[in-house]
Amino acid sequence: MHDMSNRVALITGAASGIGLATAEALARAGAAVALLSRPEDDLDQAAKRCQDHHDRVLTVGVDVGDPAAVRAAVERVERELGPVDAVHNNAGISIVAPLTETTDELFERQLRTNLAGNFYVLRETARVMQPRRRGAIVNTASELALIGQAGYVGYTATKGAILAMTRSAAAELASWGIRVNAICPGTTRTPMFLREFDGAADPAAELADNEASVALGRIGDPKEIASAVVFLLSDEAGYITGTHLVADGGRTGCVPAGSIGTAAN
Ligand code: NAD
């Protein structure tokens, strides 16, 4: 396990799914953790799970799409837990709809949370890290930053932009001793995933199709994404910046499994 003791970690979208799994993994690795999520989210149950591993856990209800609220939240975390030096910039939503049925309102809501929200958290945490010349940030993108899928035009636009933003932020912040990377999860069993599959015409068939396109033959567990994020935030990843780590069971890197014959040409 990576040693994150004496570190202060800030995680957004920490009330459930991948963010909660990362918060728990960071607390288990020794970090004090600040759990940020929408004000209406159940942050108390998330905090209890982290308190099993660490006694310094702070919860802050915040909409990442509100820049003033994000700035105030980061200031509060610094005041109450100390200097933040690890950030999982993870809050996100997925709106699934055919392109021609994606209204302006739906598209803008997607942009506001996933892209503007990611930018505000990136900017405000970089701002407090710069004077200390130390820190690591991981932005959550998606395998859908790398491949297209019907129904996800707006979502993929935000996730592709997060990868581009990650590279430029890494270039700019390297001289300040701050590393910036992205994680690209594949399909992962979280409340977001469950909502999407529940909305499918035939959820069981949808799941079977989905799993058949993954080299490892199954969807991911949030803990498997969290462990990759903890690695990127740890000192063991000290020479890694401006890139992304794909944790998708091989979906984007491998063709679906087929039978192996023999041939010699
Ligand atoms: P989730 O819905 O379980 O968790 C997302 C959390 O973010 C929730 O607690 C939600 O309330 C919070 N959130 C949403 N909007 C917010 C806002 N405006 N301000 C603050 N908090 C907000 O989803 P998840 O699957 O854990 O997703 C986490 C991240 O991983 C997202 O960025 C998502 O796009 C990405 N992702 C998920 C999958 C997957 O299959 N689950 C795959 C690739 C990428």
Image (cartoon, rainbow, N blue to C red):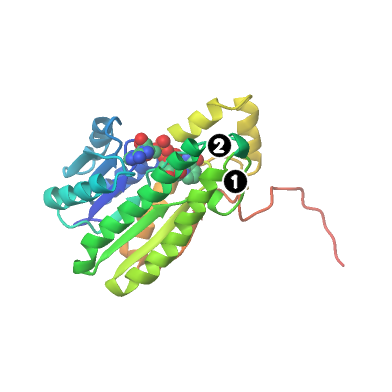
Q: Nearer the viewer, residue 164 or 218?
A: 164
Q: Nearer the viewer, residue 217 or 93?
A: 93
Residue extending farthest to the right is 265
184 relative position to 48: left or right: right
Q: Look at the numbered disc 2 and give the secondary structure of its residue.
A: loop
Name the kind of residue labelled 2 in the image.
Thr
In the displayed structure, would residue 175 be above or below residue 104? Answer: below
Ligand 1's quadrant is top left
Residue 132 in which image quadrant: bottom left
Q: Nearer the viewer, residue 110 or 180?
A: 110
Residues packed near mark 1 inside 10 Å, few (<14), some (14 to 19) or many (20 plus): some
Quarter the N terminus occupies:
bottom left
Q: Which mark is residue 216?
A: 1
Residue 203 in which image quadrant: top right
**Residue under pointer 2:** 102
Name the N-terminal-most of marks 2 and 1.
2
- Residue 182 position within the rendered picture, expressed as x and y whole percent measured from the top left: 43, 57
Q: Look at the numbered disc 1 and give the secondary structure of its residue.
A: loop
| Residue at image location 50% in from the left, 39% down from the top | 104
